[in-house]
Image (cartoon, grey):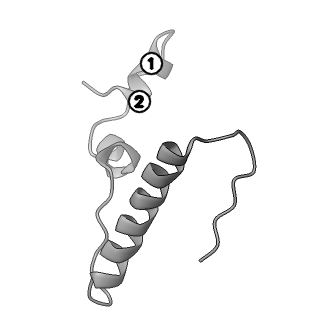
Amino acid sequence: MTIKVVRGNPTPEELAAALAVVRARAAAAAAAPPGAPTSRDSWSDPSRIAAHRLPQPGPAAWGRTYWPG
């Protein structure tokens, strides 16, 4: 795996921290059994919004689209 810094000038400590995160994520992905479900962040889950009733039309409907309740 090759990683290239394309912008900025990171310190050796910042670069080491970023590479540690990348290596840890890669190791976790390699250790998962094939076909294992991946965890999804609930914020990006479309069923979070679809599970609720749709907002009624009106001036504030755009705000209720993403903040059900």
Looking at the image, the residue that sits furthest to the front is: 12
Q: Residue at x 44, y 18 (%)?
A: 63
What whole-number distance in Å separates the C-alpha atoms at marks 1 and 2?
Answer: 6 Å
Looking at the image, the residue that sits furthest to the right is: 6
Pointer 1 with pointer 2, Cβ within 8 A:
yes
Nearer to us in this view, 41 or 28? 28
Position of residue 25 measured from the top left corner of the image (x, y, whole percent): 38, 66
Would you say 60 lies left or right of 28 here? right
What residue is shown with label 2? 66
Q: Quadrant of residue 26?
A: bottom left
Q: Which residue is drawn at 31% across and 70% down?
A: 38
Q: In which quarter of the image is the C terminus?
A: top left
Position of residue 61 measured from the top left corner of the image (x, y, whole percent): 46, 19
Q: Quadrant of the N terminus?
A: bottom right
Circle 1 crowding by C-alpha within 10 Å: few under 14, some 14–19, many from 20 = few
Work out whether 68 lies above or below 29.
Answer: above
Work out whether 67 lies above or below 23.
Answer: above
Nearer to us in this view, 67 or 34? 34
Nearer to us in this view, 3 or 61? 3
Q: What amino acid type should be assigned to the residue bearing mark 2?
A: Tyr
What residue is shown with label 1? 63
Say which element carries label 2: helix
Looking at the image, the residue that sits furthest to the top is: 59
Q: What amino acid type should be assigned to the residue bearing mark 1?
A: Gly
Say which element carries label 1: helix
Q: Which residue is drawn at 31% across and 73% down?
A: 28
Q: In which quarter of the image is residue 20?
A: bottom left
Work out whether 66 lies above or below 46.
Answer: above
